[in-house]
Image: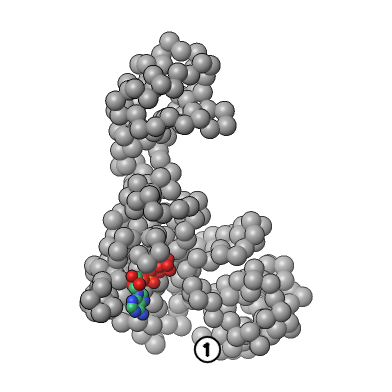
């Protein structure tokens, strides 16, 4: 279990992280969200023990993060850290030995992962000869070769095509099943939505939302109504107080409302129309994020 308690980090007089707390249990995937400059990388660095906080604490299974626990952490950082002149095999042996593994077990693990990621033929190729996506897979293998208890993934899907994204996602889900605690940052909300039970949204180093995704969505007052039918009168819908917008999507309308009580007013209005679908749904994480963080964020 990772426990982050009230961490504060200043760069000069700017608070990059300002009183952040959260917990990630074993086998849990936790999302750290925020626009550029919100404090994600700073938070990751503090957790990895690469940067010290001005105050607050970080513990893994009750122990402060220092050299005695760093062997239990694996990470894919924003600035990728492969040594381009080494071969894949040399690279992974290098990382594995740093994490205290013997060469035989490193090679066994390496063969498993190269096969799983469909890149066995690259074992003796230099990192610099690999495509960006394949380098990304090697980066991931180097982070998990030692079966870490805690895995930190800063934007792990950058540069991967959809097939490889799925391959990596499946690997992450397997690690979760094996009990790894995983912290994950991504600017793509659908990745977070698909994966993370729990999350924090950071704005200027402060958590403006913190908790289980399901609870966050449920407690969010704004909802969407999905409406399908003949002769939908958009202007009439827009005139209902509490209706924020009405948009036509492929074969249905999405009505955004500012409170779920507005749904019954919409229902009253359309009762006599020829309607084939009326569904009140929770907003997407992307909508919540944009609403909370502001329109500056682009998907
Ligand atoms: P991104 O999504 O762009 O990677 P981030 O959420 O990871 O952003 P951080 O890199 O943690 O954000 O930066 C948080 C704040 O701290 C920003 O205002 C940034 O300018 C500032 N900052 C980060 N590193 C330093 C540093 N070494 N010296 C001074 N300020 C810094």
Residue 288's x, y, as percent?
Answer: 37, 46
Position of 103 relative to 238 (above/below): below
| Percent position of residue 55, x then y | 22, 77
Query: Disc 1 designates what residue?
Result: 98
Q: Residue at x 39, y 19 (%)?
A: 236
- Residue 91 x, y percent position in the rendering: 62, 85
User: Who's the residue at 53% across and 32% down the image?
Assistant: 249
**Measured along the vertical axis of the image, is residue 50 above or below residue 273?**
below
Identify the image quadrant of the N terminus: bottom left
Q: Is residue 216 above or below residue 130?
A: above
The answer to whether any part of residue 62 appears in the image is no
Label total for image: 1
Horizontal placement of 210 versus 273: left or right? left
For ligand 1, which image quadrant applies? bottom left
Residue 143 located left or right of residue 109: left
Q: Find the residue positioned furthest to the top.
A: 272
Residue 138 appears in view: yes
Residue at position x 31%, y 75% from top?
A: 58
Q: In this view, does 138 lie to the left or right of 77?
A: right
SS of the residue at dot 1?
helix
Find residue 142 and report its horizontal and vertical position in percent: 57, 78
Residue 157 picture quarter: bottom right
Compared with residue 224, is residue 90 higher up or lower down, i.e. above or below? Answer: below
Give residue 103's quadrant in the image. Answer: bottom right
Residue in the foreground of this view, choosing between 254 and 220: 254
Q: Residue at x 49, y 72 (%)?
A: 78
Pick the front one: 175 or 169 = 169
Position of 61 compared to 109: left or right? left
Q: Residues within 10 Å of mark 1 (few under 14, many from 20)?
A: few
């Amino acid at each position: 279990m990772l426990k982050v308690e009230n961490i504060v980090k200043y760069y000069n007089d700017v608070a990059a992280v300002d009183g952040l707390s959260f917990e990630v249990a074993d086998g849990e995937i936790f999302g750290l969200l925020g626009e550029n400059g919100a404090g994600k990388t700073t938070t990751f660095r503090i957790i990895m023990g690469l940067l010290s906080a001005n105050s607050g604490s970080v513990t893994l299974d009750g122990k402060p993060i220092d050299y005695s626990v760093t062997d239990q952490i694996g990470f894919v950082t924003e600035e990728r850290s492969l040594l381009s002149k080494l071969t894949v095999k040399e690279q992974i042996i290098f990382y594995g030995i740093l994490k205290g593994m013997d060469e035989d077990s490193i090679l066994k693990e390496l063969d498993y992962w190269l096969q799983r990621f469909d890149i066995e033929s690259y074992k003796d190729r230099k990192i610099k000869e690999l495509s960006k996506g394949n380098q990304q897979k090697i980066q991931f293998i180097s982070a998990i070769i030692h079966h870490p208890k805690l895995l930190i993934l800063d934007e792990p899907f950058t540069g991967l095509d959809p097939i490889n994204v799925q391959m990596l996602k499946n690997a992450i889900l397997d690690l979760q099943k094996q009990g790894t605690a995983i912290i994950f940052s991504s600017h793509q909300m659908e990745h977070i939505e698909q994966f993370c039970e729990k999350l924090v949204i950071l704005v200027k180093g402060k958590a403006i939302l913190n908790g289980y995704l399901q609870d966050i969505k449920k407690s969010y007052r704004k909802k969407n109504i999905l409406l399908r039918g003949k002769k939908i009168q958009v202007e009439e819908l827009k005139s209902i107080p509490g209706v924020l917008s009405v948009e036509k999507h492929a074969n249905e309308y999405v009505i955004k409302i500012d409170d779920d009580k507005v749904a019954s007013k919409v229902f009253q209005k359309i009762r006599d129309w020829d309607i084939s679908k009326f569904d009140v749904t929770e907003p997407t994480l992307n909508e919540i994020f944009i609403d909370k963080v502001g329109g500056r964020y682009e998907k």
